[in-house]
Amino acid sequence: MSAIGAATPLLEVRGIGKRFGAVAALQDVSFDVRPGEVHALVGENGAGKSTLLAIVNGLQQPDEGELFLLGRPTRLAGPLQARRSGLALVHQELALCPNMTVAENLFLGQEPRNALGRIDGALMHRRSAELLKRLGARISPQQRAATLSLSERQLVEIGKALAGQPRVLVLDEPTASLTDEHVALLLQTVERLRAEGLGIVYVSHRLEEVLRIADRITVLRDGRVAARFGAGEANEQKLIRAMVGRELGERFPPRQAPARGAKLIEAVGLGLRGRYRGIDLAVHAGEIVGIAGLMGCERESVIRTLFGLHAPDEGELRVRGRPMRFAGVGDAIEAGIAYLPADRKAEGLVLGMSVYDNLTLGTLAPLSRLGLVSRQRQQRRGGALIEQLRIKAPAPHRGVVNLSGGNQQKVVLGKWMARGADVWIVEEPTRGVDVGGKQHIWEALHGLSAEGKAILVVSSELPELMGLCDRIAVMSRGRITGEFERAAFDPDAIARCAVAA
């Protein structure tokens, strides 16, 4: 970690307050970042982090307080002005143009031009390659953004911010979509940028990363600063206590060996040309099975096949022992399969609809009469799910887009619980979710398994798989290279299987 002196802050907020109607989102929040410093900002979902970042980036104006950039008081009119003032923010939610190349996305709005004022494509591709190399990303500048994995898209978003050569870099959950391999590369990049004198605001729910990388840590709770820590002053328990105002029990709920029932879903020799081959995997009733692997191992392609998004070229898919061939996701849903995607905003929710609408989207028939949805029944059913999953939704009749990431994930979970699926395919279940919200989601998945549901989990966090699952299958280069029962979980052995040729 760097030694931070008394240098003038590159970014400072003083006494910031912000209200939305009767709700105080921020109250008297002060925070700054200095040259050559990583200042971490942590807090539960709903603590006010997103509102603070929106103010810092010019998306919202504070009701109280002042904002300083490079030592000068400023009032930002929007993200473009923030970028021109030397601040770049990398959002947790990705915003690439899918039909454009990686190079075009990296320099969108800031394309290098030749003497005639035309875009210099060769120079743009050269600079793109340099940026991607700097991030340790094995991505071609000519590749279309639509073909990138979630992890690769996150790296491109970070590269896009660095293309503008900012003095202050704000990273909002930068590793939420990354594999362990790319997390290590990103943290190395952050350390290099700090050494170059950048001021970095690092927002993350991954407390082990925060403790490793941060020079200072500010904790928000209920819109206020709850605690501040210098380097070496905090540990994970202190941060959790400051974030939630109480002690949390064991990180993962206790897990007893399940009484395995019948195979509810099974892949036998499943293959998809150019992606994976020879996949043999079964999940029994009452069992939670994880799939581990590095980026590019094609585990996402496997689970999407199980949900009818891809059609396999070979092998057989069985549900409750019966061979199945899905023509699309509708067939998978009718077969009793639920899918929680990693990108909940793009694939799991209808952002313009209310919390009630999203929770009941798959079960409208029993809530309807003469073809019209009964709002009373819908709100009664939605309200029960909100209470059961402890969803923080002060106005559930309003758009789900207004909820924090963790509460949005609970809405996706509740939507499928309302439908009563027997097979659950869950991808990155706690991506961008705070420590308290993670426990709620893990408890919900354990509760589903206790009801006899079969649950298949893909996660980039190996500790999550080891804490949650009864069995872990490991993939490398499109095939399963190892399988471990809970009693034999070994991080080193799993890692070796993840890089097997």
Image (tube, rainbow, N blue to C red):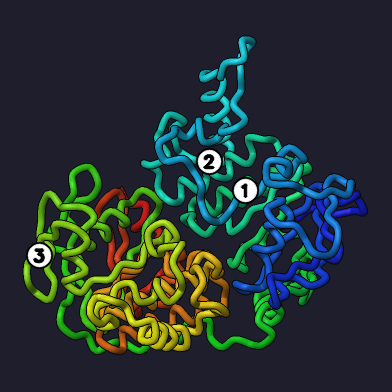
**Residue 324 tag number:** 3
Closest to the camera, between mark 3 and mark 2, is: 3
Measured in 3D between alpha carbons, the distance from the residue under mark 3 to the one under mark 1, in whole angstroms, is: 46 Å
- In the image, residue 116 above or below residue 372: above
Q: Residue at x 46, y 50 (%)?
A: 151
Look at mark 2 in the image and give the residue it sits on: 136
Q: Residue at x 24, y 78 (%)?
A: 365
Mark 2 or 1, nearer chain start = 2
Mark 3 or 2, nearer chain start = 2
Does residue 330 appear in the picture of this structure? Answer: yes
Q: Amino acid at mark 3?
A: Met
Q: Are the residues tagged 2 and 1 within 8 Å (C-beta)? A: yes
Picture quadrant of residue 493: bottom left
Look at mark 1 in the image and give the residue it sits on: 188
Measured in 3D between alpha carbons, the distance from the residue under mark 2 to the one under mark 1, in whole angstroms, is: 9 Å
**The residue tagged with tag 1: helix, strand or loop?**
helix
Find residue 94 and report its horizontal and vertical position in percent: 51, 50
